Image (cartoon, coloured by chain):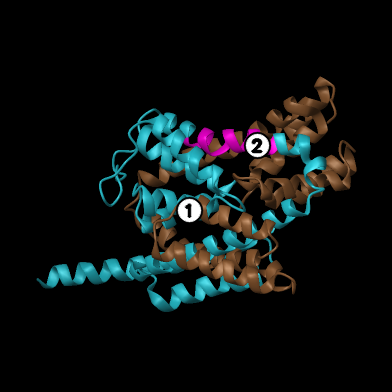
């Protein structure tokens, strides 16, 4: 963990404020620009730190956007983490609140009806693609392929057939994985 | 600014709704803490299947809008759900629930990461959790498929748009923003045309009576 002078902390905050409105499809879409700024231009953190931030956010519970405060933390400790998280969320959140209220009050107009109907199949396709991309690394790993395939299939079946809370399935996955079975 | 829009359905299919902004905060904290490898599938599970605050169709609708907007999709989704029950206080409660506890955990992990990474059991546990996350998302995708039955685009256009976005991401690895904007605008245009057709047909049968 490092510390940065107040001027650099402000620059970090402003940089995330501007990236916020560009992060269509999620904060991960601006990761290449964050890499350029943090690692290449400013040299606040190293290459390995950047990869670690993304891996940690994916392993930890919660939204993947949390790789952003980890970058801030690596560069400037807790103040950096807070500045990064507030910066990346504030503009997009205010815009989303305004747009969703605007849309909700015009729910029955042809344009808004068409918007939600036209987007729905694209959304479903993207969720299938996400499932595929998450499963793919296991298919290319001969040592764990069969165990992982069983775990993926069982999880999907239990989710479709029961009301079991996800945390129990995740716990079973963690235990089987730690034991080297899956 | 403080009241949610009145013409939005205030409760889910079974008439369920959160009791207070604090109940929203707790619900979103609990679902975020179960969200290893992504929160979306857990959110669908908890809010739609278990608590019944939203129908599957409403969830797809809100998520479709959430991902067109800048910002993390699940954060946008949280704020839209919170806002529709308790206005900006609900939005704030939902976002804070979604982020606060996971923020503390990820920062603690970042501080202690180097010691943890030495254990092979930790890597194994993460792999097992990743496989479960993949299963959760695939199950969610199958559930979402059912909501397209009532879509005014009809089965063929829905299949075309869905497969196009699946292939664009899974095979061609195109940036998400291109797909959401490109196919989203195409879907919007097609659906606008279908709305005109459906409304014209409804008007004709109305006159015929």
Q: Nearer the viewer, residue B187 or B174?
A: B174
Q: Nearer the viewer, residue B107 or B165?
A: B107
Q: Quadrant of the C terminus of chain B?
A: bottom left
**Which residue does the numbered mark 1 point to in the structure image?**
B63
At horizontal 71% and vertical 48% (from top left) the residue drawn is A30
Q: Residue A70, percent across and down?
A: 73, 38
Q: Is residue B23 magenta?
A: no
Q: Quadrant of the N terminus of chain B?
A: top left
Q: Is residue B157 above or below residue A32?
A: below
Q: Determine the main secondary structure of the stretch shown in magenta.
A: helix
Tell me, yes or no, if residue B168 can be seen here: no
Secondary structure of residue under mark 1:
helix
Rendered image quadrant of residue B114:
top right
Tell me, yes or no, if residue A127 can be seen here: yes
Q: Is residue B95 magenta?
A: yes
Q: Is residue B102 above or below residue B47?
A: above
Rendered image quadrant of residue B123:
bottom right
Chain where mark 2 sits: B
At horizontal 48% and vertical 65% (from top left) the residue drawn is B139
Residue at the left extreme, as displayed: B209
Q: Tell me, by letter, which chain the rendering colours cyan.
A: B
The image's mark for residue B105 is 2
Q: Residue A3, percent across and down?
A: 84, 25
Q: Tell me, by letter, which chain the rendering colours brown.
A: A
Q: Residue A27, percent across and down?
A: 66, 47
Gap in Å between the C-alphas at discs 1 and 2?
26 Å
Span highlighted in magenta in the image: B94-107
């Amino acid at each position: 963990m490092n510390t940065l002078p107040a001027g650099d902390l402000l620059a970090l905050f402003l940089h995330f404020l501007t990236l916020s409105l560009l992060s269509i499809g999620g904060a991960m879409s601006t990761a290449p620009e964050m890499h350029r700024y943090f690692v290449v231009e400013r040299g606040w953190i190293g290459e390995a730190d950047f990869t670690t931030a993304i891996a940690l956010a994916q392993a930890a519970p919660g939204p993947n956007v949390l790789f952003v405060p980890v970058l801030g933390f690596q560069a400037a400790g807790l103040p950096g983490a807070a500045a990064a998280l507030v910066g990346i969320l504030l503009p997009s959140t205010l815009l989303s609140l305004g747009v969703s209220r605007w849309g909700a009050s015009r729910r029955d107009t042809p344009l808004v009806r068409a918007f939600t109907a036209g987007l729905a199949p694209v959304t479903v396709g993207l969720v299938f693609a996400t499932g595929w991309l998450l499963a793919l690394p296991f298919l290319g790993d001969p040592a764990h392929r069969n165990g992982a395939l069983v775990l993926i299939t069982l999880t999907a079946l239990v989710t479709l057939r029961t009301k079991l809370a996800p945390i129990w399935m995740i716990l079973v996955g963690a235990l089987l994985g730690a034991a080297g079975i899956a | 600014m403080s009241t949610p829009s009145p013409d939005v359905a205030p409760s889910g299919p079974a008439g369920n709704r959160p009791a207070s902004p604090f109940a929203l905060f707790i619900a979103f904290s609990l679902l975020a803490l179960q969200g290893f490898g992504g929160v979306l599938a857990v959110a669908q599970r908890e809010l739609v299947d278990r608590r019944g605050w939203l129908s599957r169709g409403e969830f797809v609708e809100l998520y479709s809008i959430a991902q067109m907007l800048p910002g993390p999709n699940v954060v946008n989704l949280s704020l839209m759900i919170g806002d529709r029950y308790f206005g900006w206080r609900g939005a704030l409660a939902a976002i804070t629930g979604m982020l606060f506890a996971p923020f503390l955990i990820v920062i603690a992990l970042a501080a202690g990461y180097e010691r943890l990474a030495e254990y092979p059991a930790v890597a194994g546990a993460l792999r097992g959790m990743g496989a479960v996350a993949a299963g959760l998302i695939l199950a969610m995708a199958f559930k979402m498929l059912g909501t397209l039955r009532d879509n005014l685009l009809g089965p063929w256009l829905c299949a075309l748009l869905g497969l196009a976005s699946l292939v664009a991401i899974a095979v061609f690895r195109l940036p998400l923003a291109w797909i959401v904007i490109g196919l989203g605008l195409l879907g919007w245009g097609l659906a606008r045309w279908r709305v005109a057709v459906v409304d014209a047909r409804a008007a004709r049968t109305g006159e015929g009576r």
